[in-house]
Image (cartoon, rainbow, N blue to C red):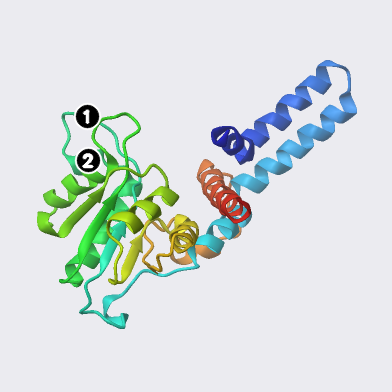
Amino acid sequence: MTIFIKGLLDPYNILWFVIFIGFVFYLFKKRTLARGLFIASGIWFLVISTPPVPTLVLDSLERQYEPVFVDRLAEPEASYDIIVLGGGHGFDDRLPANSLLSSNALGRLNEGIRLLNQLPNSRLILSGYSSSGRTTQAEMLKNTALLLGVEEDRIMIQTEPGNTLEEARVYAELYAGEQPVILVTSAVHMPRSVMLFERVGIRVVPSPANYQLKGSWRFVRFGWPAMDYIGKLRAGIHEYAAILKYKIV
C-alpha cells in the first residue's frame, strides 16, 4: 500500500497518467477533453521540471536545520551518541565497502565521522537492516568507517530497523541514556527524522548532510526543464507525505 501511494504522489507518474487519460478521451472522440488534458500535461511538465516549484519545496525542508559546528556546542566535551541513519547500499564482491554504499549513505557517514573526529568522547551509532538477508546497512556503514580509520571500539550498530521510526525505537531501547544525541541524516529527511525521534522520547541535535540545494542554487527561479528537478520535487513530496502520515496516525 505504501509503495502504491508513493507511486500516486510521484509527479512524473501523474504526468504520464494525465497523458494516458488524454489519449483515452482522444480515442473515444472526446477531442475537447483530450486537448484540455494534453495542455494540462504540458503545464504540469513545466511545473515539475523547471526550477521554481521543485526548489521551493525542497528548500523548505532542507533549510530547517543546519549542520553541527562543534565550537558552537554548549558541551563540546560531553560524550555524544552520533546516530547515522541508513541510506542504502549494493553488493559486488569486487568492491570495498565504501564503494558499495549509496551516495546518500556515504554522505551521511562522512558527516558522522566528521563529528566523531571532533568529539573525542563520543561514539558512532550506525543503523539499518537488510531487506535481502545479506550484509545489513549498519554493518556496511561500519565496514566503511573502519576502512576510513575509525576505531572499532567507538562504533555501535543496530541492524534491526527497516525505517526511520524503527531506527528511533531501537536506539531508545538499546542505547539511550543521559548522553546527548546528534542525529545525522540527509537534509531533506531531517524534519521527519527529528519528529520521529521525539515521538519515542529522544531529543536530538540535528546535523543534516547531503544537501541537494547549495549556495545560489537555492534561489534559482528560471531554467530549462530537467529530470533533476523532477527528482527534487519527488523527494520533497515524499517527505511531506510521510510527515503528514505520521502526524495523523
Residue 166 lies, with reference to residue 76, above or below; the image says: above
Residue 218 lies, with reference to residue 103, above or below; the image says: below
Residue 199 placed where, x, y %? 48, 60
Residue 78 lies, with reference to residue 208, above or below; the image says: below
Q: Nearer the viewer, residue 18 or 125?
A: 125
Residue 150 placed where, x, y %? 13, 57
Q: Could one spot residue 166 in this view of the protein?
A: yes
Instruction: Indicate the quadrant where residue 6 lies.
Output: top right
Q: Is the residue marked by circle 2 packed among few (<14), some (14-19), or many (20+) residues within 10 Å? A: some
Residue 94 placed where, x, y %? 16, 30
- The residue located at (13%, 50%) in the rendering is 146
- The residue located at (22%, 40%) in the rendering is 99
Q: CA distance from mark 1 to mark 2?
A: 9 Å
Q: Are marks 1 and 2 in contact (CB under 8 Å)?
A: yes
Instruction: Indicate the quadrant where residue 108 lies.
Output: bottom left
From the viewer's perspective, tell me whether residue 166 is left or right of residue 239. Answer: left
From the viewer's perspective, tell me whether residue 85 is left or right of residue 40. Answer: left
Quarter of the picture holding the N terminus: top right
Q: Kindly identify which residue carries mark 1.
A: 92
Q: Kindly identify which residue carries mark 2.
A: 99
- The residue located at (23%, 47%) in the rendering is 141
For badge 1, the amino acid type reads Asp
Specify which label sits upstream in the sequence, 1 or 2. 1
Q: Could one spot residue 149 in this view of the protein?
A: no
For badge 2, the amino acid type reads Ser
